[in-house]
Amino acid sequence: MNDLQLAYNGFGQLTSDYQEHGGAVNLSMTPEVAYGYADGSANTIRPTTMTYRNGRVLTFDYGASQSPADAASRVNALIDNDGTTQLVAYSYLGAGAFVIANSPQPNVQYTLIGTAGGNDPVTGDIYRGLDLFGRIKDSYWYNTGTATDADRIQYGYDRASNRTFRQNTVAESLTAEFDELYQGGKKRHPYCLAISARIGPKDRVRCNSWTSGASQYLFGFDATGRFRRRLGTPPIESRASATGGRQPGGELRGRRTECGRGGAFAARAERGLATRSKRAAGKRQHRPVPRVLPCRS
């Protein structure tokens, strides 16, 4: 049996987190993470420390007294147990959105400013990772030791700010299948999700227009956008036909997916033997009609 016990202060803030993996929580023996806060006397109850069971204390640094970070109770850095080593330091855009998280020990920097320098050619400012609407379009995890991308993920959106693709450029160089293409859906949920080792500009238009092997997932939702079922996980095999460049998908569990010039569809294929139904005039044989579900764009 696993047991979890949480403790809170008078402001409703979490102060202790006990997790026991072999029975009930024992306050004197169970591993604990403790959290410290300002007491409110300086008009703030912001987090100050995080203490592990072994006594290691991490401190939330808010910069110099009366600095913008201090006045806004905005974490400037996370300090290690020695009181000087910065585990991560933050740079912000506006009141609370950080655009740089620099971790000196692993030599990794997360940045929405990018590494090319200068202004973004579309937005005209230095934040190359943000589009004109403030959405993340290009996020870097940059290795400051080797001056290379440890990871880099790019995003695309439609006019309603629904995400249309997720592209991992580092994984592409390793032919790893981490690119994702989203299409259609209700209430901002993907109706069609395809995963591949690479996507190109044209592949961002249709679910099945992949130039290499991919896996596709189709989802069904009710009228309120709640998830109802997964319609299938057919592996996509890129087989361009001789006419029109259409690339039908594979088959799994009796379902066939196909996306052509006119749109994307998930059709319920005919299954098993013909069903029989009795009518007044006698027995009549029927085959189930394929049900076509749109993979909306």
Image (spheres, rainbow, N blue to C red):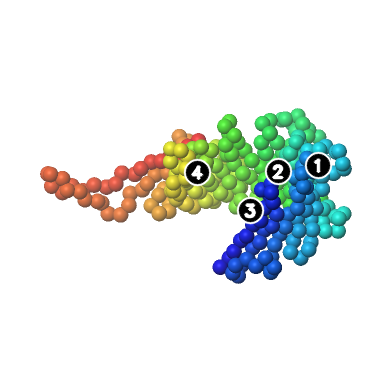
Camera-nearest label, 4 or 1:
1
For disc 2, the marked residue is 139
Q: Which residue is mark 1?
A: 42
Of badges 4 and 3, nearer the viewer stands 4
Of marks 1 and 2, the one in the foreground: 1
Instruction: Find residue 113 and report its image quarter.
Output: top right
How far separated are the C-alphas under marks 4 and 2? 24 Å
Mark number displayed over residue 192: 4
For image coordinates 45% across by 42% down, the residue present is 221
Which type of secondary structure does the marked residue at label 2 adopt? strand
Three-letter code, disc 2: Ser
- Residue 24 image point, x, y percent: 60, 67
Q: Pick out the residue farthest to the left.
A: 281
CA separation in Å, label 3 and label 2: 20 Å
Quarter the N terminus occupies: bottom right
Give the label, 3 or 2, closer to the camera: 2
